[in-house]
Image (cartoon, rainbow, N blue to C red):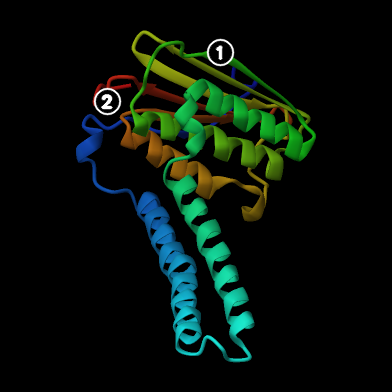
Amino acid sequence: MPRAPATTRHLITTEPVQHAGRAETAPLLEAQRLALAREVHDDIGGALTALHFDLDQFVRHPDAAEAPERLRAVQEALRQAIEATQRVVHALYPPDLDDGLDAALRGLVDRFRRRTGLAGTFTGSIGDTRPSAALQLTAYRTVQEALSNVARHAQGHRVDVTLDAADGMLRVAVQDDGRGITAEATPDDRPSFGLRGLAERARSVGGRLQVDSAPGAGTTVTLVAPLAQGAPA
């Protein structure tokens, strides 16, 4: 398990809720749901509306001069609807998790390396442990957001992701060797909104999120949550 940087500042430490399933909906999670609803309405709904209109015109006037153009427009609307659907499905539950949490997190790190050119490692395993779908999704989103923050803000050279399940708890940590999160950083350089969202996700599964950072010594994001949902972390 990575150790927090020396002279660490504890930026975020959440306390778990006793009954996560009965907790009130957090504002940040509600904002994420609204964003998905807008994407379904605007992107998928818009593409399907255009598709319906063009097909209706084609059926009414199949021999019209513009019929081939109508069919091309139908193909484009279908493409947009398919892409938007895939984005929404991935946002709700990444298909990567069908292969298990170990493989899903390893895939995230592999794609991070290819996309950024930075060094990255994934170590650990939960073996035959089968966390709930909600807990797996929370762990996946934690690593995904932490890696995104490393790429955008850390200005480091490497990141290490560790995972384990022991004593009834799941632990996942993302540690980078970047500049850390300083008090002098501008709002655009602080990954605060995403981290608050992760903290709310951790609470929703009865867990806690801790973000440790020190100037020049990197940042460590750690999720600890009970494998038995509803148990305190």
Residue 167 circle label: none
Q: Is residue 8 above or below residue 69?
A: above
Q: Position of residue 85 (x, y in %)?
A: 47, 56
Residue drawn at 51 percent across, 51 percent down: 86
Quadrant including the C terminus: top left
Q: Could you tell me which residue is drawn at 24 percent across and 26 percent down?
A: 230
Q: Are marks 2 and 1 in contact (CB under 8 Å)?
A: no
Q: Which residue is mark 2?
A: 229
Q: Position of residue 186 (x, y in %)?
A: 66, 53
Query: Could you tell me which secondary element the residue under label 2 belongs to?
Result: loop
Residue 225 x, y percent position in the rendering? 37, 24
Depth check: give the residue in front, 87 or 190.
87
Which of 177/216 is in front? 177
Distance Cα–Cα, label 2 vs label 1 = 22 Å
Callout count: 2
Q: Secondary structure at mark 1?
A: strand
> Label 1: which residue?
124
- Quadrant where the N terminus sits is top right
From the top left corner, tell me how far across and down residue 120 is, in percent: 71, 25
Sort mark 2 into few (<14), some (14-19) or many (20+) by Cα contacts within 10 Å: many
Q: Quadrant of residue 138?
A: top left
Mark 2 or mark 1: which comes first in sequence?
1
Task: Name the residue located 61 percent from the left edge and 47 percent from the top edge.
Answer: 190
Q: Is residue 1 visible?
A: no
In the figure, is residue 170 to the left or right of 173?
left
Q: Residues within 10 Å of mark 1 (few under 14, many from 20)?
A: some
Type of the residue with mark 2: Gln
Q: Amino acid at mark 1?
A: Gly
